[in-house]
Amino acid sequence: MVDDFAPIRTDRLVLRRFAARDAGAFRVYRDDPEIARWQGWDGCSRDEAEAFVAGMEAAVYGLPGEWFQIAVADRANDRLLGDIGIHVLAGEPRLVELGVTFAGAAQGRGLATEALDALIRRLFTEKAKHRLQASIDPRNARSVALFERLGFRREAHFRRSVWAKGEWCDDVVYALLAEEWTGAA
């Protein structure tokens, strides 16, 4: 089912649609080589950031087969800290793939855990999703730890299965079923 994305508020964060004011902060963390290392992009220009944000402002949330990026902002000042990608699978809309990117300065404080926990709660309780998954390069220890902390289990480890940034990389798939979810991060 396709619907609009209603903001989610946590103690420290607001998960919301992207807005034009986010383009600058988005560009800064997407252009950081340490952040881009584990992602499918290599830097981000001002024009690319503005186009991406404009596209997400107008994007349809929950459209099967399409990625939708959710802005994660500081609740106190609405400053963009990162984003969570959500991809409802085209063939089965009860299955969802997730991806997470946070600015370096926003890492290590439990913000990604807080944001994902709130989104997972909505996906399982309000949107009746069956299964959530994430595909991670196993060398990305912070992402592996994040999904394990949230109760995801490693389902698969594909050896040298993804060509990225000039090399063959391993890919691990983490998943969480609605029936496994405890609701406590």
Image (cartoon, grey):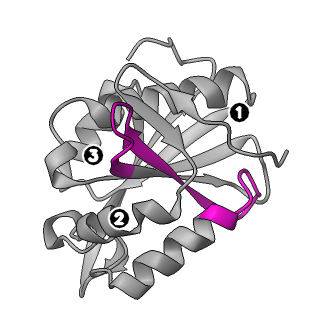
Q: Is residue 2 magenta?
A: no
Q: CA distance from mark 2 to mark 1?
A: 28 Å
In the shown orientation, is residue 4 left or right of residue 86?
right
Q: Amino acid at mark 3?
A: Ser
SS label for mark 1: loop
Provide the residue designation for mark 1. Answer: 129
SS label for mark 3: helix
State the image quarter where residue 142 is shown.
top left
**38 or 53: which is nearer to us?**
53
Residue sitting at 61 percent across and 62 percent down?
67
**158 or 152: which is nearer to us?**
152
Q: Which residues are magenta?
A: 57-82
Q: Can the viewer see residue 38 in this picture? A: no
Mark 2 or mark 1: whose residue is earlier in sequence: 2
**Tag 2 near tag 1, CB within 8 Å:** no
Provide the residue designation for mark 2. Answer: 26
Q: Amino acid at mark 2?
A: Phe
In the image, farthest residue toward the right:
1
Provide the residue designation for mark 3. Answer: 143
SS label for mark 2: helix
Q: Nearer the viewer, mark 2 or mark 3?
A: 2
**7 or 171: which is nearer to us?**
7
Residue sitting at 82 percent across and 49 percent down?
2
